[in-house]
Amino acid sequence: MTSAKPGSRKGLLSREDYLAPPAVPTGQTPKDVLNIIWRKNEVFLDIGSYSIGSFVMVLWPVVLIFLWMGWAMGFESLDVLFWYGFMCFCGFPILMLIYILSRPVPPPVRFNRQRREVCVPFDDGHYWIVPWEQVTAQAVAMDSVGRHGKITQGLLVVGFRNPDPDAPEKERDFSLGFSCGGGETAMRLWECMRSYMEVGADAIPLGNDLEGIRGKLGSKGIFWGVWYGFFIDIRDHLMAREFGQALSFFASIFLLGTPLVMMLQVWKLAPPPELTNPEIIEWSKPLPPEQWAQRSPELEQAIRLYQAELAEESQVA
């Protein structure tokens, strides 16, 4: 039997999973591990690649380590080597963070399940309308082995082909990269897009309601409101004798900088950017059910083949 899955390729320290096309199920449950779902309804799904939260959560522990080293060694006795290391590992990333925060949030990519098309907007105002079944997806994972054991890094790459066959070479492809670790985690993230388009809006999680969070902060503002909410949660868990939950909140504050992450996400993504081009607005309007686009025969056959493989595997088991 010919496999319905696009396939995988394994190396000594790497793995590549080709997820689409065809966009058959991966077998994983949809999970928005990076908060990429910005807006969802019955017509379209907005996916954003603005990963300010993951950037801060990677930078925060490094800053804490240098602060601890400076305190332990005595800030007045630190030499040039320490400050050089601080600038390399903390200073330049902090400057990069400030620059990212000063820039407008990039527009999201919009998946229209009724038309079975994807709108890829660009900062200069132009956009592509790409057929859903031509969207590519690949999960890449790389292993590195060091003194502290094996470390796996990876990402999900979702690619789009310019529908204009006469476009210049450098404008023929566009891709979104999500640093989610590869493997099953990347498949779960891809399933958020695939399940929405092939199953429906109820098949995927809601995502972070950043607009709702901002509304609840009210007069306290983003800064005090976020910190107040975290400390109230810790207090409630302690009063309920849920010490494990309280400890996890405490650790997330000081080890991962979660309040800072939440503050920046609410500030930049509540509300998330809209697609304001009149043509995209018209394209995003709902259609009568009889006008909805349907799966191609090729994808329908691939999904049936996948289901037959699952049934065959269950009988063997």
Image (tube, rainbow, N blue to C red):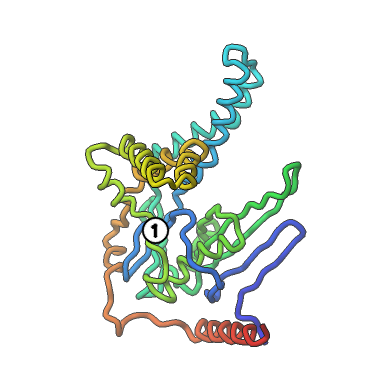
Residue at point 41%, 39% (across, down)? 259
- Residue 21: percent from left, percent from top: 55, 73
Residue at point 52%, 36% (across, down)? 60
- Residue 82: percent from left, percent from top: 63, 21
Q: Which residue is mark 1?
A: 207
Q: Quadrant of residue 39?
A: bottom left
Q: Would residue 307 be found to the left or right of residue 121 on screen?
A: right
| Other residues around mark 1 within 10 Å, as few (<14) / some (14–19) / many (≥20) | some
Q: Is residue 199 above or below residue 9?
A: below
- Tell me the quadrant of the picture where the N terminus can be found: bottom right
Amino acid under disc 1 = Gly
Q: Is residue 165 above or below residue 174?
A: below
- Residue 188: percent from left, percent from top: 52, 64
Residue at point 54%, 31% (across, down)? 63
Residue at point 52%, 62% (across, down)? 158
Q: Nearer the viewer, residue 234 or 61?
A: 234
